[in-house]
Image: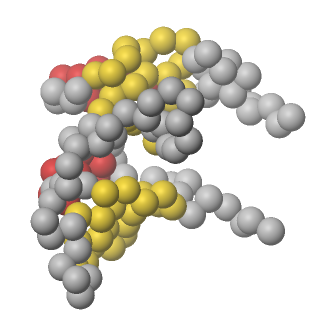
Amino acid sequence: MIKSFEHVGMVTADMDRSLAFYRDLLGLRLHLRKTMANGTEVAFLDSGGGMLEIFAPPGGATPALDLPPATSGVLHITFLVESVDESFAKLEAEGVEIKERPRPAVNSEVLDRVAFLRDPDGIIVELAERRGELKRI
């Protein structure tokens, strides 16, 4: 039934600031940016394996809150990188807020190394690295 993952949508307080993070620092490719009739800006950024859709309401938005334990919702968004350590070092040097430094992944059946950062709105972004072929269960 499903062909592939298409996109995840999120809200930002400042589109230019989010584009500077996701496009300029992380390297996602801007596919579309426009303003809708209600004044909300929208952008689609291509990650190579799906898109990130960002909405910027005309009145801004409050910072993201971490999801409390045992609460349904999205915990973080994850991007696959060649090297977690190298990507993390670049982002740290750019002053990106750090949540968790690079370490071995807990779910080592899927991922090798991970690190966690925050985007400009406080949304948790995971950098992940795989080594070898992903085993399907």
- Residue 134 drawn at (x, y percent): 74, 33
Q: The N terminus is located in which quarter?
A: bottom right
Q: How is the image coloured?
A: secondary structure
Left or right, 105 with reference to 94 = right
Q: Residue at x 18, y 79 (%)?
A: 39
Q: Residue at x 57, y 63 (%)?
A: 6
Q: Nearer the viewer, residue 110 or 122?
A: 122
Farthest residue, direction bottom: 37
Q: Residue 78: in sight, yes or no?
A: no
- Look at the picture and state if 54 lies above or below 75: below
Q: The C terminus is located in which quarter?
A: top right
- Residue 96 drawn at (x, y percent): 21, 30
Q: Nearer the viewer, residue 113 or 7?
A: 7
Q: Quadrant of residue 100?
A: top left
Q: Residue 135: in sight, yes or no?
A: yes
- Residue 26 drawn at (x, y percent): 32, 42
- Residue 41 drawn at (x, y percent): 23, 72
Q: Quadrant of residue 123?
A: top left
Left or right, 19 with reference to 66 = left
Q: Residue at x 25, y 55 (%)?
A: 12
Q: Residue at x 29, y 42 (%)?
A: 64
Q: Nearer the viewer, residue 77 or 70?
A: 70
- Look at the picture and state if 98 lies above or below 65: above
Counting labels gives 0
